[in-house]
Amino acid sequence: MDYILSVLIFFPALAGLLGFLIDRKAVRSYVTTVATIEFILSLYLWIQFDNNQLGMQFMEQASLIPAFGIQYLLGVDGISLFIVVLSTFITLIGIISLPEDTKDLKEMLLTLLFLEMTMVGVFVTLDAILFYLFWELSLVPMLYIIGAWGGPKRVYASVKFFLYTFAGSLIMLVGMLVMAYLYFQATGVWSFSLLEWYRLQLPFDYQLWLFGAFFLGFAIKVPMFPFHTWLPYAHGQAPTVGSVILAAVLLKMGSYGFVRYSLPLYPDASVYFIVPIAILSIIMVIYTAMVAYAQKDIKQLVAYSSISHMGVVVLGTFALNPEGITGSIFLMISHGIVSGALFLLVGVIYDRRHTKMMDEFGGLASVMPRYALIFGIMMMASVGLPLTIGFVGEFLSLVGFYKVSHILTILAGTAVVVGAIYMLSAYKKAFFGTVTKDENKKLLDLNGREYATLVPLTLLVIFLGVYPKPVLEPVDNSVKAIVSLMHQKAITDEAKEVIPEINFNEEAR
Amino acid sequence: METLLYVALFAPLVGSLFAGIYGASPKTLLTGIVTSALIFTSFVASLLLFLHLYSGGERVHVEMMDWIMAGDLNVPFGFVVDQVSVTMMLVVTLVSTVVHIYSMGYMEKDKGFNRFFSYLSAFVFSMMVLVMSDNFLGLFIGWEGVGLCSWLLIGFWYHKESATWAANEAFIMNRIADLGMLIGIFLIYWNIGSLQYDVVFANISNLDITIVTWIGIFLFIGAMGKSAQFPLHTWLADAMEGPTPVSALIHAATMVTAGVYLVIRANELFFLIPDVGYFIASLGAFVAMFAATMALVNRDIKRVIAYSTLSQLGYMFVAAGLGAYWIALFHLVTHAFFKALLFLGAGNVMHAMDDELNIMKMGGMRKVMLGTAVLMLIASVALAGIYPFAGFFSKDKILEVAFDGHHYILWGTLWITAGLTAFYSFRVVMLVFFGSERYKDFGFHPHEAHSYMLWAMAPLAVLAIVAGLFEHQFFDFVHMVLPHYEFSEHTHHMVGQLIIVTTAIAVTGIAIAVFSNMFREGLFSSAFRNNFLYKLFDNQYYIPKIYDEVFSKPYKELSEVFWKQIDMKIVDATVDGIANTLYATGEETRGMQSGNLSYMLRWMVAGLLVLLVSAVAYTYSDVLLTLLQGVAK
């Protein structure tokens, strides 16, 4: 399978186009099959992936616009591999989770397939223009999902989501054009190939400006404080499946961008901005956790908790050492699984009660014990309990950043406390106590469809918490490659000192 | 030997999963029997491991599989059974077996019977991970695992608001301390490059002493949370909301001693930093007395015992802080026996009294529950430290250590506390089992517990009596891994006098409790109850109230402000403001494009003017600049 990456990108989209011809009644099984095949393909990619190879694998290359050096350039390494698998997995879970009574089910299903194309595309392209293309394209299906299937304020929320992230990425586009121009100045040919950009050593002040341009694009997507306010609206209004994919995958585009673009392209600027970015991350961790604590709507709470966790992800990335970056990538994956599951769980109760207000619940543990159990496991994973998936990434991110700063890590480490505060008090409100509302007395526990989505996620949360090695190892190898590239490229003394030199072990060579 | 290790470690997990399968089903006695049998298996395996080590065998060390590997960090699931961990394993599995069997009776009418055993066994598994791990992060797994189980079990009766509140309080307060522990782990990693005990302790003496000090401080912060030392102590008394067997196992015998275990385990580290050790000892002595004073006046039988636990943990920290690690471990062991016994006895009393906790409503109950009365009396005598009961040996050793280091203030504090301990233990015994039968006024009909529950408690009673006699064997066993504590000649000569002085104050305490209760119901007259000190003790020094006012409420209010004022009104409003400005500008300037010819001509003229002016300005920009500079001057 030489073209597996192309297949992974375009198979869902082509199948989606074909899907318009399928009968309304049959479309669900059709789309589920497509998503399953796509997921199996991504697993095949993982199996074929060579852990010991440091660089890009499954590369594909074709010239698109030679005059400007725009190529069709694809490839995966350990960093993107698992985010791709996560994307196909979460899409499949999202498709299964759709309730039978969703209005315009066919359109929703096909939209999800197009969304899947853009997600896989973003993570496997190594050409900046192509990356930008998929990046922006991903907004469209999501705009559609929120705008068409959302809550009462769906139009406001979807337009805000679209315009805000769009504005950020436009600035990123300007940065890309400047990068290509600088490359042209240095070599005499135009190129948007990321791999070629990697070889460019830029003067410090250029790095600062370009870092800033990319930063805005990524920071709004993550979303970092103070660019985060679109997220609670988007989650608040989006249907369950929209929230699941938004939290699990779309936010990761931003943090992935940091690792793929900002760090290796601008190592000195990355070092220069460590402290301001760390401060923003700490604000994200503490401030949004407190805002989450004040929420009365459980979905908003999970939305704000996402921001809080992404704070730790960004912090780990800017530790600029293998421990921290590997941790932040693992945390992206674990946050994808856990927050996806939490949004599904919120969806479960919303489908039954048509409310997300925690005051409306109470005592659910006695009516829906299995639901309470899975919610409890996911909550503990979110809080970062060891032997769940949430601990590994959080621990590594913080351990990595500790090398950079003691005080800032202690502040960011309060994540383990503030996270517990809002999660446990929410759980107490919804699940403990006595059942006070009559509507809650006869609630049904999880049904077959809900089991089918939640059980795999729960098993993953525990399996990867106990044995994270299958994921950590490839990620760590690719991260080491990036860190060593950064160390070589760094021009300032400070950056040389902060970014460690990597001694690859024998196997990895 | 490795098989034994795995059996000891995983048998409780199997039990927990087995009971968990039946978690939501109606009560099946099977879950209780299977989990108890598996915990007993674990006990037997631990015992065999103990015999192996006792007969001079090598320590057992296994690396099961990799866990976290990233960068240079490499943490496996590794387990070690040496003299210290096997001691902990024996205590944990023995008390757990007793508590499991006891709970079959205690929880017999509870509809969460299966769930209870699942949690209880999960706790035992976590505790075994904690004590058996061969590295700091593995210890942290167990550390958080027992925290989770403690949360589940304190909040076991989740329909009760007070129970779930207490569960959350315990979890969150422990998390604060855990952050300290994590920082300690980070420091170890970046300075030594490994988290394995062997590597860390082999290299710790090469580190700069400031760093070792910081590591010690942060690890001890972690220990303060689990062992409920001041100022993180309030959760322990509130944790009494859980079922009583839980209090016996988790909040008396095992989990709360994890902090002491950590200090003992890291003795090679704390040995290098005697100043931190002295701080630990001082805090321990302070907590010993502080908690004992609260125990003096409390009327809730479980809370009295909880404060007593707190106080005894203080004793252990004094020994550990002063470098007498084996004595700390010894007191940990004896305390586990008599305190678990005391709690289980209290459980019988509660059961007899339909979950009534107020000792003022009891009295004279020895007539209906003689077995429990005898068991609790044994435990109380051991707690008070009367020869030849277990508490006498271990507590007295701690006093000797304090005296030996010339820490007379610590010694004095502990000495007075010994008197208070004897007093409050016997105050409870007198008020519950002797005197007039006040319960009749409140319409209770107490009855003795199942006989098998009493028999289950019997091993603990025997150990509470005789465990102290094995002091020398215990010392010979653990000193292979723990440093020897040398008493000076001076102390050797004084031992006799010290024992007499200590025993005297304990006996005095008992005597006051006994006589005051014989002559007067309750001890404290109403005049006394208005006393300042009484109020202070009774309100737990107002600390829970202060925490509520200083931390909980402001945190909640600040959260509201952050959300409603800052996030919505400032951050989001700015974003919308920018968008609205753009939108409004468009709306305003839309008029330009009306298509009306005369209107558009006017705009054209305006545009031309602007262009002309800028062209002129650009051409004469040098002149203009000089002019402007001239003006500026």
Image: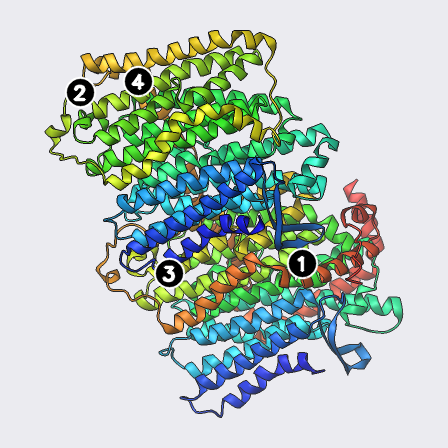
The amino acid pointed to by label 2 is Gly
Q: Position of residue A62 (x, y in %)?
A: 77, 82
Q: Position of residue B199 (x, y in %)?
A: 70, 40
The amino acid pointed to by label 1 is Phe
Residue B43 occupies which quadrant of the picture? top left
Chain ID of residue with mark 4: B
Callouts 4 and 2 close, C-beta under 8 Å:
no
Frontmost of labels 1 and 3 is 3
Question: Marks 4/3: CA distance?
Answer: 49 Å
Frontmost of labels 4 and 2 is 2
Query: Dot 4 corresponds to which residue?
Result: B534
Q: Secondary structure at mark 4?
A: helix
The amino acid pointed to by label 4 is Tyr
As drawn, A426 above or below A222: above
Q: Secondary structure at mark 3?
A: helix
Q: Are marks 1 and 2 on the same chain?
A: no
Query: Dot 3 corresponds to which residue?
Result: B21
Image position of B42 (left or right of A60): left
Q: Position of residue B328 (x, y in %)?
A: 52, 26
4 or 3: tag closer to the N-terminus: 3
As drawn, A357 above or below A446: above
Frontmost of labels 4 and 3 is 3
Q: Is residue B195 visible?
A: yes
Query: Dot 2 corresponds to which residue?
Result: B435
